[in-house]
Image (tube, coloured by chain):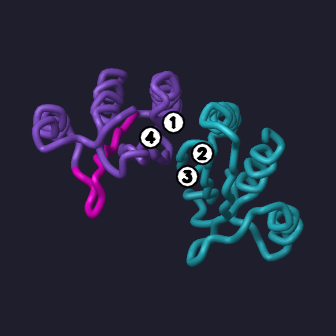
Chain colours: A cyan, B purple
Amino acid sequence: MSERLSEETRGPLLDPLLANGWTMVQGRDAITKTYSFDTFVDAIGWMMRVAIWAEKWNHHPEWSNVYGKVDVVLTTHDVGGLSSLDAKLARKMDSLC
Amino acid sequence: MSERLSEETRGPLLDPLLANGWTMVQGRDAITKTYSFDTFVDAIGWMMRVAIWAEKWNHHPEWSNVYGKVDVVLTTHDVGGLSSLDAKLARKMDSLC
């Protein structure tokens, strides 16, 4: 079971992401990033690769797509905020670009 | 090249969709529908099938996904509103459920 990030764990897990294009969502304990791809096929292909990891880890993003753009929001509904799973999925998303 | 739906073509193309869960978007010449699937895999699998047709027809949706829910908006940016391509893609989306 995942737990909400504590003050101690928050910095080490989130700071590298915040330095890599992720930002905090206003009014929510969640992180967001916009990915831009050259084509729709590139965007959907990336979403499919991410989806397999999301399902494998049973941790799913909120995301939207318009042509080559994908907006992602990550949070952990079960704990009402960010958990280590969000950081893990964010790192995977970055690595799959 | 696609053209914006005329008064004459609008009813015959849109009425069957509006009777099948599609609604007009407030303030835009666009149609929207929310699809609900039992699982994330069902939702993403459907999105992938739709994506292949969207790319084949070079006509792409605005869509967002959270777990088993997919919100879709269709319009034709090139013509500033709805075209027959939107009706075609909407029918395909419904048929792929």
Image quadrant assignment for residue B70 = top left
Can residue A52 be seen here? The reply is no
Image quadrant in which the N terminus of chain B is located: top left
Report if residue A75 lies within the magenta region: no
Identify the subunit bearing mark 2. A
Find residue A60 and name its label: 2
Question: Which residue bears the numbered disc 4?
Answer: B61
- Above or below, A89 against A25 in this view is above
Residue A90: where, in percent of width, then height? 75, 52
Label 1 to label 3: alpha-carbon separation = 11 Å
The answer to whether the residues at label 2 and label 3 have Cβ atoms under 8 Å apart is no
Q: Callout 4: few (<14), some (14-19), or many (20+) C-alpha neighbours within 10 Å?
A: many
Label 3 to label 4: alpha-carbon separation = 17 Å
Numbered disc in front, either 1 or 3: 3
Image quadrant assignment for residue A27 = bottom right
Magenta segment boundaries in residue numbering? B24-37
